[in-house]
Image (cartoon, rainbow, N blue to C red):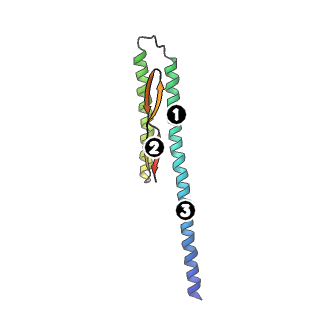
Amino acid sequence: MKKYFMLLFFIFGFLFLFDVNANASVSTHQEVVEIVEKANAKIDDEIEKAIEKAEKLDDQDKKYDEKLDKIIVLLLDKTYDISSKTIENLEKDGIEAECYHQLVIIGDRMVYVDPIRVHSW
């Protein structure tokens, strides 16, 4: 009788262990999605700010190209910082994420920024 009791105890313990791990991976997946969505939202905000700044520029101004260059460089620096820090933090947890290029038009120029997508976990 003790053998059957111990066997049932181990079976239920084993099933409980797998159930907890299954729930942990779902919450981990949700956390990863939230982290990536938050970073991509920050990147989208920076894109919107750059577009608004570029729209305010006068294209007849002699320094139009210089000012537009500054806006674009600032945008690329900020989006790179956001994506690289997020990817580094995800890699610490064993999650592979990567940047992909998204075409954005700033002023009269086409610029590729780098939002994030999860590759595997």
Q: Nearer the viewer, residue 108 or 34?
A: 108
In the displayed structure, 4 sits above or below 29; it is below
Total labels drawn:
3
The answer to whether marks 1 and 3 mark residues whose Cβ atoms lie closer than 8 Å is no
Residue 22 circle label:
3
**Residue 110, image x, y percentages:** 44, 26
Left or right: residue 67 compared with residue 23: left
What residue sits 46% from the left and 20% below the top?
A: 108
Q: Of label 2 and label 1, which has the lower sequence position?
A: 1
Left or right: residue 94 compared with residue 49: left
Task: List the single residue furthest toward the bottom.
Answer: 1
What residue sits 50% from the left and 30% below the top?
A: 47
The amino acid type of the residue labelled 3 equals: Ala
Q: Residues within 10 Å of mark 3 (few under 14, many from 20)?
A: few
The amino acid type of the residue labelled 1 equals: Asp
Which residue is label 1 attached to? 44
Q: Secondary structure at mark 1?
A: helix
Residue 72 circle label:
none
Q: Of label 1 and label 3, which has the lower sequence position?
A: 3
Q: Residues within 10 Å of mark 1 (few under 14, many from 20)?
A: some
- How far, Cα to Cα, is label 2 from label 3? 25 Å
Which residue is label 2 attached to? 86
Q: Secondary structure at mark 2?
A: helix
**Residue 79, image x, y percentages:** 45, 34
Q: Of label 2 and label 3, which has the lower sequence position?
A: 3
**Residue 66, image x, y percentages:** 39, 18
- How far, Cα to Cα, is label 2 from label 1? 15 Å
- How far, Cα to Cα, is label 1 from label 3? 33 Å
The amino acid type of the residue labelled 2 equals: Thr
Quadrant location of the N terminus in the rendered image: bottom right
The answer to whether marks 2 and 3 mark residues whose Cβ atoms lie closer than 8 Å is no
